[in-house]
Every structure is written in C-alpha cells, then in structure tokens.
Image (cartoon, helix red, strand yellow):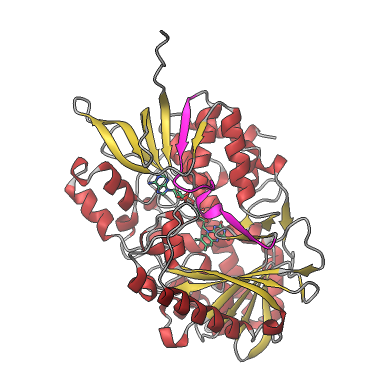
Amino acid sequence: MKIKEEIKYDFAIVGSGLGGLQCAYILAQEGYKVVIIEKNRQLGGSLQVFSRNKHIFDTGVHYIGGLDEGQNLNQFFKYFGIMQNIDFKKLDNDGFDQFKFKGDDKTYYHGQGFENFENILIKDFPDEQEAIKAYSKKIRDVVEDFPLYNLEPELNLDYYNSEYHRISAYEYIKSLTDNETLQNVLAGSNLLYGGSAGETPLYMHALIANSYIESAYRCVGGGSKIAVHLGKQIRHKNGKIITNNAVVSCNFNTETKEISSVKLAQGEEIKAEKFIFNIAPKEMIRLVGADKFKKAFVNRVNKQKPGISSFSLHLTVKDKSIKYPNYNLYYFDEKNVWDSINYEEKNWPTCALVCVPYSKSTTEFTQVISVLTYMKFEEVAAWKNSVKTDAIKNKRDKSYLEWKKEKEDKMIDFLEDIYPDIKSQIVNVESSTPLTYRDYIGNDHGAMYGIVKDYNNPLKSFMNARTRIPNLFLTGQYLNLHGVLGVTISAFITCFEFINKEKLLEKVKQAK
Ligand SMILES: Cc1cc2nc3c(=O)[nH]c(=O)nc-3n(C[C@H](O)[C@H](O)[C@H](O)COP(=O)(O)OP(=O)(O)OC[C@H]3O[C@@H](n4cnc5c(N)ncnc54)[C@H](O)[C@@H]3O)c2cc1C
C-alpha cells in the first residue's frame, strides 16, 4: 500500500492581503514551497472587489501612485509581472486629486510631477510661492531618508531612526504658511492615512503624498486584478492557495518552541518550516497564544490604538447621467481638514472622497460612484457581536439595516453639494460600514489602515518582521506603512529575512 506523503511547506502564509501574496510570490520565485491560507473566498484583503448589476466596485484600493516609468512602484510591479499584465488608467495630469470646500466655489488641484504640482498651486496661491516650493522640496527630502523607497538597500532597517517619525505633519504644514486654504489643500488627501493633527507623523504624509504627486493611476477593472494576477503566478510557481478556510490556532513543537503547524477552520493541519502572518498582530497573538510571547510585547500590541474605520457608499447611477471624472474629488464641510477625523455624529459626514472606478466598458460617462468617509467603530458597537461575510452567511439585525439605510441617506444628501441631481439618477445603493471591514479583513475595530502611527511616540506602533518565535514572521500594513506602496516595501522587508537583500533588490531593478 502506498502511504500518502505528508506535505511540509517551506513557508505557510496566513492571510492573502497584498503583503501575503507578494511574500508568497517572492519566495516561490526563489524556489521555496509556499502555501497561502485565506479565510475569505476572494484573495487580496483590501484589494477585494464586489459586483452589482455587472458593475465592479473597489472596497479598499482606489488609486495607486508611483507607476510611471522609472518610478518606485513601477519597478516593484515589473518584478511581480503586474505592469506587464494589468492595465492602469492614468488620472488627470493637472488635477488627479481635486479639492472643494463648502462655501468656497473654487476647486483646487494637485498635479502630477513635482514641477507641475508646484506651478498649479502657485497659480491659485501666487503669494505663496515660497511655501509651496518649500513643501515640495521637503516631501522629496523625506523620501530620501527611506532608501528602500528608492530601491536602495538600507544598512539599518530601523525606520524609526528617521527624524520624520517624530515631526507632526500638521505642524509642519502649518509652519509653512498662514494661508489656511493652502494648508488645507496641501493636506487635503489626508483621508488616505486617517490624518490626525495630534498624531500623524510627517513621514507618513510625505511618503504617500510623494507617491501620488509622482503619478496617479486607477487599476482598470478594480484592484482585485492585482490579487488575481499574483494568485495565478504563485500557483504557476508551484505555490498552493487555500481560500475560504481561516487559520484558527497554532501547534507548537515543545522542544524547539517553534510553530509546527497551523490548524484551519475546516479541520486540516498545515505544516511548514516557517510561518508569515499577514494579519493584524493582535489577532496573530490570539491565534498563536499570548503565553508564547513576552508580556511586554503582548501589552504593547494590545494597547496599540486601532486607526479609524470608514463608511463607503457604492452607487449605481443611470447611464449617461454623470460624466466619468478622471480624478478623485475630496469635499469638506470643515474649516480645517484635520478636524474631519474627529467628527461629531450629529454633523456626520463632514468629508467625502469620491472615487469612480474605471473599467474597460467605461465611456465618457460612469454608471458607478464610490464615496468614502470616516466612521468611528463606536457607531456600530451595538451590533459588534454579529459577523457577516460572503463566506459566513449570517444576517445582521434589522435595527442595523435601518441604521445603515439612515447613514446611506445622509451620505447621499451630503453628495448633493457635489452632484445636485444625484437622487434622481441613483439606480442602486450599497454600503459598507466598520463591521464590514472588520469581518472581511479582520482588523480590530474595522481600522482602515491598521494601527495609529503617532509622532509623539513612534516606537509604540513599531512592528518588526521578526518575532520572539524563531520561525514566525510578520508582513503587511502593520509593519511599515499601509497602502499599496507601503505594503509592497513591507513584503520585501519580510523576505530580506530569508533572501539576500542586495541580490533580491538587484532582481527588482533588473525586471523589465
Ligand atoms: C477603505 C480603504 C481604502 C483604501 N484606499 C487605498 C488607496 O486608494 N490606495 C492605496 O494604496 N491603499 C489604500 N488602502 C490601503 C490598502 O488597501 C491596505 O493598506 C493594504 O491593501 C493592506 O494589505 P495587507 O497586506 O496588510 O493585507 P490586508 O488587506 O489587511 O489583508 C489581510 C488578509 O488576511 C486575511 N485573514 C485575516 N485573518 C485570517 C485568518 N485567521 N486566517 C486566514 N486569513 C486571514 C483577511 O481575510 C485578509 O484577506 C485603503 C484601505 C481601505 C480599507
């Protein structure tokens, strides 16, 4: 009788967010035997999309920076075969991000390319040339402090050495000019990182702003194209992908004190030499067991503040009713854009990011509109014990559905400032709340971007790829920085633990 050989992988990766997929790709490419385990049906975490009436909506990633030839993400994406296989739509060169403020008829623009960015702002703020140029230079100086963003290996991977972790983004921008409108325009896309005046470090603002000012694109057909491509390539390189099956616990080798296997919800056990967790560290500790870590580490992680969550409205509108905007629109009902995150429930929403997905069938008109705004988890706390995803078919309470409908209506009222006839044009309304994000991604409190990074105490949010358990590693947005670029860099930081850094980066630089 033939005995079935038990598979032992070189790497088991828990979670198929962008970071998990990229680690799997890199390791499989280097000849390792990898398996990814994902709790959802769809790969990609925040790259997931959903469809209604044949229209695709993004749930997380709406636009991506640094994709022009010669720019950092373009080169990283070439290494992953993404540039060669996926279509991207470049947003408007002279206004990829546009900003409107209630009571001000003017629209303000961020242009692509630093010179263009400066010139467009100088036209709107002719007396502020000095401040605008100083801002633009500072953004590039900050990026210089993070060599991996320029595809250069770092001697020391301690990112927290950079002084820009300890400088407030809000204070820095305020120090440049007394012109409050310009301050708001410079920080106007701070929804991309949950900008908080008392917490957000300059490095976070600068790395993200730099990436989009360099160039800004949408993923044609939705961000999930990236996940699907990576999944296909991982399988092609003999990697295995298990979906719809969560990791629920870990087994330990009592002698080596290493993880020997992970147990899945449907009962299987997956053995591997090394384990990479692409999930929230708090959840990782719960699955591995708090007793396996130092108390100080567990306390620190448990005390980390989850970032703010969001409410997203996804509208289908009548054909030929709304022109496709090849830009993102940020709209504020606030005097100071940094106040949006501290909204009061009675005034909600106070800001909106309108992002319109682009697909091959998009004409000069759009039939879909997505709108994103902040939402605190407290607003859904009454229903926090309910869980629902497409894999877990539970129903939410009627009171939750009524509350959600109320929020949808409020958000649509708010949108009337931008699209006065919107109500008569809507065909279908969908929305997602902090509970949706929590259940699909697994982040504490449905936090959009993981934990809060705080310039007052950068070390509080510091996460290393390595853990106390010799064969347990971390990757993803908790490590370094969230967003497509931040997570891509984190995947490399994790893989440098196993692969020679210089050689791997050389392969990235050589990718065509
Ligand atoms: C609303 C929103 C808008 C955004 N907009 C942008 C944008 O426009 N541009 C941009 O660059 N970035 C954007 N981001 C940020 C970006 O999407 C994220 O930073 C990035 O995708 C996170 O990737 P990750 O690798 O950390 O994994 P995540 O996306 O966090 O995925 C983690 C994965 O782990 C899985 N998992 C969790 N627990 C388990 C378990 N026990 N077993 C198995 N699997 C498990 C989850 O199901 C999930 O698939 C946005 C995020 C949000 C939420």
Q: Is residue 504 left or right of residue 106?
A: left
Q: Nearer the viewer, residue 485 or 125?
A: 485
Residue 56 appears at what percent x and percent y? 66, 59
Visible residue check, residue 482? yes
| Residue 312 picture quarter | bottom right
Residue 409 is situated, as x and y percent measured from the top left of the image, at: 55, 82
In this orientation, which residue lies closer to the viewer: 444 or 505?
Answer: 444
Picture quarter with the C terminus = top right
Quarter of the rendering containing residue 473: top left
Does residue 263 show up magenta in the picture?
no
Q: Is residue 147 visible from the viewing direction of this image?
A: no
- The x, y position of residue 11, in whole percent, is 42, 30
421 with respect to 354 (left or right) = right
State the residue at coordinates (41%, 58%).
Answer: 450
Quarter of the picture holding the N terminus: top left
Residue 49 lies within the magenta run: yes
User: The magenta stretch spans which residues?
Assistant: 32-53
Which picture quadrant has residue 300?
Answer: bottom left
Q: Closer to the camera, 211 or 174?
A: 211
Residue, x 53% and y 40% (percent of image)?
152
